[in-house]
Image: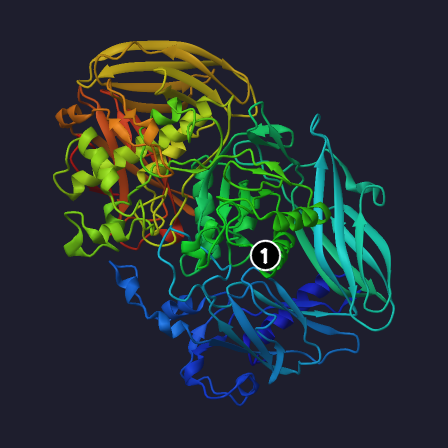
Amino acid sequence: MVFKSSYSAIYILCCMLLLVSCGKNEKSEYKSIKLSENWKLHPSDSIVRQGEIIASQEQSVEGWFEAKVPSTVLGTLTANGLYGDAFVGKNITDIDKTQFDKSWWYRTEFDLPQLGDNQHVIIDFDGISYYANVWLNGKLVASRDSLYGTYRRFSFDITSFVTEKNTLAVEVFRGQAGDPNVGFADWNPRPADENMGIFREVTLKITGSAKLNNTYVHTKVNTQTLDEAWVTVETEVENLTDAPVNGELKGKIESISFTYPVSLQPNEKKKIVLTSEQVKDLHIKQPRLWWCNNMGNPELYDLELNFLTDNAVTYTDSVTFGIRQIEDFFDGDDRRGIKLNGKKVLLKSAGWTDDIFLRDTPETNELQVQYVKDMNMNMIRFENFWGTSQNIYDLCDKYGLLALVGWSCQWEWEAYYGKPCDETYGCILNDQEIDLIAESFADQVLWLRNHPSIIGWMPGSDMLPAPKLEEKYLAFLKESDSSRPYIGAAKERTSELSGKTGTKMAGPYEYVGPNYWYIDTKFGGAFGFNTETGIGAQLPVLESIEKFIPKDKLWPLNDYWGFHCTASATAMNSLKVLTEVMDNKYGKADNLEDYLLKADLINYDGTRAMFEAFRANIDKTTGIVQWMLNSAWPSLYWQLYDYYKVPTAAYYSVKKANQPIQLIYNYGTNAIHAVNETMSDIKGHKAVIQVFDTKSKLLDKKEVEVTLTTNTASEIFKLQELTGNIFVDTKIFNEEGELVADNFYCISAKQDEYDWDKTDWVHTSAKAYSDFKDLAQLPAITLDVKCEKAESGNDVVYSVTIKNTSSDISFFNNLKLKDNNGDIICPAFWSDNYISILPGEEKMLKCKISKHDMPDSTVTLEVKGWNCSRMSMGV
């Protein structure tokens, strides 16, 4: 058999799978088909015909761009080879924005079988930006007068429009100033098309006489014993006909099966709520609980829910869920915290952004989620309802990463939104806007509420929602999702309706020294829940920088570098602050390589201290969100790995800082703290602390027994008053003598000092800097490096042994694996990096690379340190 289109093949496959999943004597009238392939795209100004013809077999698509859905118009153009160098230098400004003033047409064709008497065809659009006309087989299904709003979801019964051969055409229009659209705020340049397109999935559903809407599973856990849980299943059953329908709802969760009778009047919608009172097996004993990273396994369950009439399945819904309970609490200082299954969680997080042209894939999403887990973080903050599908949230569920989700500050500032705004409530103010955003919020919550990873809805960022809008939010959540907290804003605010936010967003967003996080008690320091903060510039490796800074602009620094900082008009749009810090702390850079080395050390120490301070002060902290996790385009600011997915130095410092059991240097008190964020108490552990001067002379060595209850930190050793710069090496061993974690610091006797009275939203500027210029005098050394390669399942594992045979400390060594072209092999998961090695010490690092990502060429290991010249060897 030859299929005339891939949709025919998908349809047949869906039929086969559904027949297998149905009961022994049941037939299925239900099929679901993603309309993702075989789309075409074209601008409207060169098409003289109207929708009646474009959505018909008469329309030729010769010369149209190949497209997929989800996509944006500009994303599609780049996939077709246009603007391939848009990210180099300032080339993105050369993209002609006027071409997006006109509408663009998406067009596809699909086949359907002949429908039965009671069958219906539904088409679902999960997201279109911003306005659209939808045509099917020459007829208008919906017009831009009603089909608008990026975060609205639309569903249409197209039974009367379809035939066996069908042509679908969607005319999309760009959002205008004052439209609440996708928002990148000041993170990066605005995409020229404002992300116009069918940016989320389009799905066809063939149903019987009734369908299910918004199936929802929520759970409660006995948080005292963790040995029982209660599952509730909700769904809405909708009669699509003008006649009464009698049927039954059949559900299955692993070994649990249930049936519930349902009678519907013509065109009736009926909400069904099933608890353990109706289905006793929904009271589950010894449940497998969903835990976040470093607390346990993120266990998942699957619900299959069918609606049957006359022994035929008219509709099937599938939900993956986790059994868990989320609660919030406020401490004595009104600081909000989160409990998971009754256990307090210190939220260790970073802020996510989608690709600038919304081109993320399941593969790139999974890599980034794996990165977050590898850095020992437990949450991602989504300042926007990001994602071209639910994939990113599915991955958070799978890998045990919490998710805090809400709107972007894009709609809170006139410069980004494009119309006057209120200084307290942002830009969504009039009744029409409020209704649109309330409906959009409801659509997004219904779309995502089954994800166990999502711990709260935060619809405000810098500002609270207007009271009239917040009233709608709260009323909706009361009816539709009371299983997780509502947090009015990321910033410290008090709402007349929802009370105190219990959060803070007081910066900094630009560099502050490591001690800031310990000594600040008013702004971004280690207390409460800091929802976005960071040290500003976090530079990529040179191999990445060379991809977007033109060769003749690499050195000295210039406005091309500034263009790839943030898009803010007032701050953080150059490397001025980073350079000033560097000049004062480490001395002026001689060349680009020297600049990047010093920037990496500033990045490593500054970011590590931020996370460690919140852990060392765990009795008064509840959460920290690094601003940001990733970048929408090649950037020099706010990122733990760069646009090309290569980790920055900060990546490894965060990984180090967040090890569940760790020793931490407190820059405020000159003490060493032990922290235990495992689910078990620890005892019989041994901390070994060694102090060296910058000439590698051992000044002090201390061994301390460590006993800590779960989720606590304690000071275990106080260093002597500093009279000069020192190195501090810490290691903690378990009862069996195995190394649990290590840490290494270079500490200045002269601490950073701040001009607190001049603190602004960007940062607190320094009036005196710590001094590390003596690091330039570290003796040059050569390391003994060996590497072994082995295969482990689908991975290749490199084991690198590095021995320091000298009498001097080998400081801040970075390891890279490269291909024949000199490109870094990525992704590559190193067990550690940017390491320091004591005299006579040997360390082993492992690097895991998927076989799929291995180059065909020879692999080269490169090692370069502060006082170790670059070494390369084939491996």
Number of numbered discs visible in the structure rendering: 1
Q: Is residue 635 visible?
A: yes
In the image: residue 636, left or right of residue 320:
left
Q: Residue at x 56, y 75 (%)?
A: 133
Out of 453 and 861, give the one closest to the viewer. Answer: 453
Can residue 449 be seen at all in this image of the molecule? no
Q: Is residue 720 left or right of residue 1?
A: left
- Residue 552 position, x and y percent, is 14, 56
Seen in the picture, residue 369 relative to 164 is either above or below; the reply is: above
Which residue of the protein is positioned furthest toward the bottom in this rendering?
Answer: 58
Relative to 96, is 122 on the left or the right? right
Image x and y of residue 413, in percent: 45, 51
Residue drawn at (62%, 43%) of the image: 452
Q: How busy is the neighbourhood of tag 1: few (under 14 within 10 Å), some, or many (20 plus)? A: many
Circle 1: residue type: Ile
Q: Secondary structure at mark 1?
A: helix
Image height check: is 27 above or below 720? below
Looking at the figure, which quarter contains the N terminus? Answer: bottom right
Quarter containing the C terminus: top left
Residue at which label 1 appears: 437
Q: In the rendered view, would you say 716 is above or below 37?
A: above
Q: Where is residue 849, by image quadrant?
A: top left
